Structure formats: C-alpha cells, structure tokens
Image: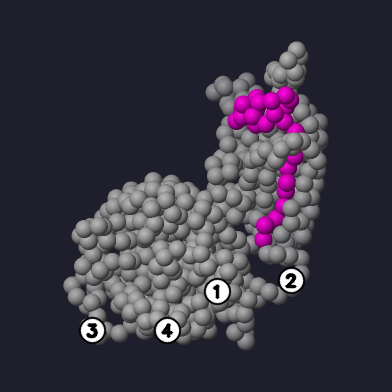
Amino acid sequence: MGSYRFCLCFTRKFKVKEAEPPEDVKQAFEKYADGGATMSAEQLRRFLEEVQGEGGASVADAQRVVDQVLQKRHHIAKFARHALTLDDFHHFLFSADLNPPIGSEVHQDMTAPLSHYFIYTSHNSYLTGNQLSSDCSDVPIIKALKRGVRVVELDIWPNSAKDDVHVLHGRTLTTPVELIKCLKSIKENAFATSPYPVIITLEDHLTSMLQSKVAEMVTETFGDMLYYPEAELKEFLSPEDLKYRIIISTKPPKEYLEAKSIKESSHLEKKDSEDDIWGNDPLDVSLTQQEDDKNEGETNEHSHEAEESDDCETESCQPGGPTYKRLIAIHAGKPKGGLKEALKVEIDKVRRLSLSEQALEKATESHATDVVRFTQKNFLRVYPKGTRFNSSNYKPLVGWMHGAQMVAFNMQGYGRFLWLMHGMFRANGGCGYVKKPDFLMRVGPDNQVFDPKAKLDVKKTLKVRVYMGDGWHLDFTQTHFDLYSPPDFYARVGIAGVPADTVMKQTKKIEDDWTPVWNQEFSFPLTVPELAFLRVVVHEYDMSDKDDFAGQTCLPVSELKSGIRAIPLHDRKGEKFDSARLLMRFDFV
C-alpha cells in the first residue's frame, strides 16, 4: 500500500496491484493447456515451438523452464507438481532472465576477415567525463572492456620530464594517467566479457626515443597476447583466428614525421589540408588548439600520407623506430591526394582510414558507393567532431549504412545515440563483433556495390504489441515520479534505422498505476531490417513540467525473437534496472 500526501489534511492511499496476465497470455495458456488448470512440459514445448518460434525446443528444455519457474516462485527444490499454473506461465513470460527478447550466444560466422564486422569502438577511452577538464583514468577503459568494447583509443604524450609516456587529451586541463597503468588494465580486463581481439588505436605524439619505450612497454605487458605480422597484411585475419589477442593500430612512425613537416608548411600556405578536401563545418570554427592537434593526428595528416619507403633519412630509422613500427598490425593513414585517392582500394594492402563524423557525411554525399567499396576490405574509423566537448555522440547509422567498422563513441557520454550503440552490440551475444549484412559485402557482375541512397522496397514488417509494464515500484521510491499519486506511464516505441524506416509511435497514457496495461499494437514496415533497431522509451507524464524518464532499451531487429517476450529496461547510462520491464509481442510478416 502506498500513501501520497494530497494536501495538508488528507492522505490518498493506493495499492500496488499484482500484474494480471493480459488476455493474449490467458488465451495461450487455455489453448496449450487444453483447457486444464496446469500446463505440462510437453504442452509448454508446443507453445515454445508454435508461438515463440523456438523450433528446436525439446521436452527437456521445457521441463527445465518449468523447474526454474517453480523454484523461483515457490522456493522449493522438490516439486509436488511438474506443471505450470496460469500465474506461473505469466511469471515465465514476464521474466527477462527466462524469456529474453534476444539470445545471449555468439551465433554468427566469426571466420571472415576483421573488416567484415562492425566492431564496438570507444573514443578517447581514458576520459572519465568531458573532453576538456575531466580526469584521465584506466577506470573508463575497464568499464568499456567489460561492456564488450573491442577498440580502445589512447592518446599518448611525453610527460613533463620527457622521459615517460602519459595518456591524456593533449593541451587541455585533463589530468594524465600513466600509459603503463592503462596497458596493464587492458591486459587484465580485455577478455572478461568476450574472447575476440582487442584493438588499441594509438594517437601518437612521441619522439622516436619514447616510441621505443612504448614498444618495450607493449611487448613486456602483453607478451604472447600481442599479434603483429612479419609483413604488412594483404588481408585481415578473422576474429576467430585472433581470439585472446591484442592488436596495435596507428600510423607508422615515418608517416607521422612526414605529415608533421607538411602540416607545418601547410599552416603557412593554407592549402593541401583536409579542410580543402572536405570543406569547413561552421560548428567547428571554435576548435581549440588541442583539437587542431588531435585532428593533425587523425585527419589532416591523412591528406599528406606518403607511401612507405625503406630509406633511413628520418628519425624513425633510429633505434626504436623500426621496433615500434613492427608492432603496428593495422596501419592507419591514406595516400596523397583528395577524397578519391583516400578511398582507393589497393590489391596487396589493407589499412585504416579515420574520418570525423562531418567528414564522413560529406564523403557520403558524393562518394557513397566508394565508401562502401572501401570498407569491404579496409577499416573505416569514424570519430566525434572536435566541438563535442561535453562527450556527446552522433548518428551511428550513417557510418553503419556505408560499412564503417569502427564508429567510435564517447562511452562516458549519454543520450539516444549511445543507446543505439548499446543496441547494436547487444547482437551476436554481446561479443563486440557483429557481422555486417551480406548486402554491404556483395559485389555485382559490373563491380556495383550497395547504394545507401537507393530507394528500396519493404522487405518485411515488424508488428509490436505493447502489453504492459511492471517493476518500477521496486526500482524507484514511491514519490520519485509524483509526490501526490502513482505514476502516469506511457511508452514510445519505434525504429531507428535507415531514413525510410525511422519512426517513433506512442501508447496512450495510463493514469495512477505502477503496473500500466496498454495492450496496443504498432506496425513497422522495414526496407533494411538488417540495420533496424527497436527503440523503446518509457516516460511518466507530468502536467506541469517535463515528463520524467522511466527507462529505455534498444534492440537489433535482426535478433528479435518472435512471440511474447519480457523486455528489460535500462537507465539513461545504459545500465539495466533490477526489475523494471515490459511485456511485449513481436511478429514478422
């Protein structure tokens, strides 16, 4: 029973009622229990096969579910009965542990080259907060790895004495952390959640001597875990081949020095820089000197990338240069010239190209199919523009639609784009590698590839019924949403995907109820279901102020299990609530 102060003299009492099974659940129970009071394991198996789409379910699987439900609900190890009542059946369907919306196993082919996968990628992985003044630490790196992130970015700079290496966001107020501490934490946590390879992208601001020191640190820390090929790769190995391995990706030392000298002259000449290729973004006029330097490391240098040579006229040929260079398994950078050259696919070479979010958008306006073709063999890394000082993020679908494997996000950030990133990498058992859809890898007889701009027909329609919600009274205080009465919940349900598929719809508002029953159905026609994500956000209506947030989730449509499912909700940061969840039904037509 909950009490709410109505005014000085009166108190209103509301009872949190037990969630009653929806009509569809009652009808399913009656049908599969053959009108009886209980449902046997064999009857449950039929339900799992015919309604839940689990064709491989055996009687033993169903019996295991029965036993788990009875043990959980009635706390007894030995059961007088081995069948489910209607309430038991409803409990099973509304349990996110027993009846989740997507699977938890790695199920995709993991033997294709790394470039055939979207890879869970973090940006400035060491920052605890904003891009300008937060602390640098190994803690966010550990958190990211435990969430399944597979690409970690470290900005490496000399310390003040120039005799050691720090990780920090250069020329800002961020406090540094020692590189060795970050490397040790990566080693200890790299495979806590996933066995597939961790890629460390280095943004390098070091002298040759300190590069030599980094090479020593990396080889000593990782030992046999470190993967580096004897010769430059012509094709990437697979995630399966590289299980439990650490991979380094950065620009080889020679290119850093050449790019730096060219950049210094280009500051005088004001030409031949990336801005000339891509055009300026008006929002980025206010870039700090630090961000300019960051762009030197990630983008402007790429405009001046020179072909490698084995001459020894540069500092990188001093002791340390070659040692450091040998550790780089995935070479970053691009050839000299403009956009067309940047996206050139070379027969005997693979590489990584980095573009800012706005540079990618400009590239896709005129060279969309070139980007897709490039990403069939090479890595494309996309990163947030420099003005996102508050660690916000951007639309990841632009990168994914064009095959970009590494869409780098501020994992310490917030907001719906980060929820979408979480949703993408809930796929394939949360292992951090998601196989790209076949259409992004296909090459036609005339060398044509997928055109993200082409108008497509509807492939399938997802029908979603939102039955009800429960669990908020266990996760929130009684007066969290409203001081005077129980909450007025409504749900927003929709699709994030290619522009033609993107839409949000809304249920009615249910007043004064901790266990709202909406029982509303929505249909979503999908032209690219492979890149569609089901978005669900629950709000509590507030007449006088902004509606309160009550939970969210984002799920890959390609992984959704059909039938009646329990959908766990998450907070703004993407952490799962203990109890708050929805009961929904999914059907594909």
Find disc 1 in the rendering and name its residue: 280
- In this rendering, position of residue 364 left or right of residue 128: right
Look at label 4 and name its amino acid. Answer: Glu
Cα distance between the residues tagged 4 and 3: 25 Å
Dots 1 and 2: beta carbons under 8 Å?
no
Find disc 3 in the rendering and name its residue: 313
Dots 2 and 4: beta carbons under 8 Å?
no
Q: Nearer the viewer, residue 517 or 489?
A: 489
Q: Nearer the viewer, residue 11 or 458?
A: 11
Q: Is residue 83 magenta?
A: no
Cα distance between the residues tagged 1 and 2: 32 Å
Examine the rendered structure and indicate whether residue 331 appears above or below residue 493.
Answer: below
Residue 510: x, y in percent? Answer: 79, 34
Q: Is residue 494 magenta?
A: yes
Find disc 2 in the rendering and name its residue: 456
* Residue at x 26%, y 57% (from the top left corner): 159
